Image (cartoon, rainbow, N blue to C red):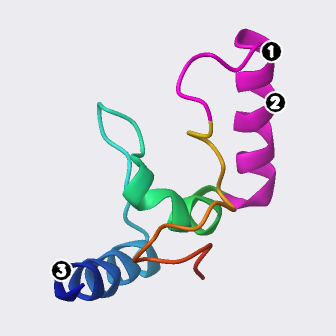
Amino acid sequence: ERYYRFKAMVTDSIVEAGGTLSHHHAMGTEHLPWLVQEIGRDGARILKNLKGLFDPKNIFNPGGLAADRKHPYLGGPRG
């Protein structure tokens, strides 16, 4: 739990300073609480629509773009 408190503090600082959380492996489930804060509600909606277009059966990484999903330690959407 201490790790997640520290991670949240650092990640909040990165996003607030205009930094990005994505990298060559994409966003990652630990960064989902910051997705909307980083790309906005419209950006999250566009990503979700694209996912639905290219993966209509939701077989690739199901729930991977659920920005409203709660992380067990980090909670739900931040910002």
Quadrant into which the C terminus falls: bottom right
Q: Nearer the viewer, residue 50 or 20?
A: 50
Identity of the amino acid at label 1?
Leu
Location of residue 9 (image quadrant):
bottom left
Query: Which numbered circle lies on residue 53?
Result: 1
User: Rounded to the nearest whole Å, what is the CA distance between mark 2 and mark 3?
Assistant: 33 Å
Identity of the amino acid at label 2?
Asn
Quickly name the residue at label 2.
49
Q: Where residue 60 appears, x then y in whole percent?
A: 56, 18
Mark 1 and mark 2 residues within 8 Å of each other at the beta carbon? yes
Badge 1: residue crowd in 10 Å (few <14, some 14–19, many ≥20): few
Magenta-colored span: 40-62
Q: Where residue 4 appears, x then y in whole percent?
A: 27, 79
For label 1, the SS is helix
Q: Is residue 53 left or right of residue 7?
A: right
Query: Which numbered circle lies on residue 3?
Result: 3
Q: Where residue 24 appears, x then y in whole percent?
A: 29, 31
Badge 2: residue crowd in 10 Å (few <14, some 14–19, many ≥20): few
User: Rounded to the nearest whole Å, what is the CA distance between mark 1 and mark 2?
Assistant: 6 Å
Front: mark 1 or 3: 3
